[in-house]
Amino acid sequence: MKQKLSWQQALQQCVTSLDALASLIPAAAELISSAAHSSFAFKASRRYLAKIDPHDARDPLLLQILPQAIEMQQNSAFRLDPLEEHRYNPLPGLMHKYASRVLITLVGSCAINCRYCFRRHFAYEDNRPGTQGLEAIYDYIRAHAEVNEVILSGGDPLLANDPLLHTLTHTLSEIPHIKRVRIHTRLITTIPERVTPELITALTHTRLKSILVTHCNHPRELDDDIAAACNTLVQNNITVLNQSVFLAGVNDNAETLVALSEALFACHILPYYLHTLDAVTGSAHFDLPLEKQRALYTVMQEQLPGFLVPKWVKEVPGEKHKTRM
Ligand code: SF4
């Protein structure tokens, strides 16, 4: 019987070399660009790679992780910091953009590097809080009574170890105005082994409500192990939501988007947001015309019950909330 990997072992086995990618997915070999890889390194978990058709260069899962030459074409509408996050960065590792929520960039890496990621050029080296930095962040949150929710975001916060997450949720729970902790992660859908008893304890041992937001763009990313991991989360009263991005070549047809919502629900996950692509340098080839997005969203509304239709949103720098489309 095949022995189950720990999440740390699965993480160690993530593929990071272009040669390994080409040998696992021969169809990718001719498209791989080392220049794009130098700009934003290729990385993916073995589980994610195993779902790609090795002979299909247009596989929607492959396109999400494949460094291609097209990323290097200049497009003035696409920028290094499309959401202007540097304007909302009062402390290293802390973002305070929306009134009632703050966001901590706890970790600077992920188990999968998504080519369209709006933080692909983010200065993580200036935004790793460390122990001292976290103390400063807690002081900031204590001093801002309008904040009731703390978001842990990417890199992937679930790459932090369980004792750190345990301490963090404990410390936040002692701040009276904090009600919730929300974790944005792509680890559950790429390394579901991450759902350990220790993680469940770290997320449930306090009075805080925990919300976990997965990131999945295509129904083929999901599998039975992911469903089981999400079931464990839900059984422990952790709300599990998903956010997706409209991506050309990946989910730019109604059939895929409807199937994605259905597959998420089958995995105990509720669709939350469907984002218009953030215009980050290197991702223009994923851009989908607005009218096409509107047409796809209309079909989703027609074919899905309301609770399976994610909110279609766009992030506009300077706005006090996400913009509904
Ligand atoms: S932060 Fe999220 S979207 Fe960005 S590379 Fe990591 S997993 Fe992908």
Image (spheres, helix red, strand yellow):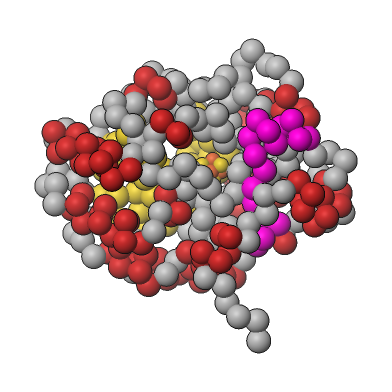
Residue placed most toward the observer, 272 or 22: 22
Q: Position of residue 268 (x, y in %)?
A: 48, 63
Residue placed most toward the observer, 314 or 57: 57
Above or below, comparing residue 253 to residue 292 in the picture: below
Residue 54 colored magenta?
no
Residue 41 is left or right of residue 96, and the answer is: right
Q: Position of residue 128 (x, y in %)?
A: 39, 38
Q: Position of residue 86 (x, y in %)?
A: 40, 22
Q: Position of residue 120 (x, y in %)?
A: 56, 33
* Residue that appears at 44% across and 21% down: 84
* Residue that appears at 51% across and 23% down: 81
* Residue that appears at 56% across and 59% down: 11
Residue 48 colored magenta?
yes
Point out the quarter of the image occupied by ligand 1: top right
Q: What span is colored magenta in the figure?
A: 33-49
Query: Where is residue 316, by image quadrant?
Result: top left
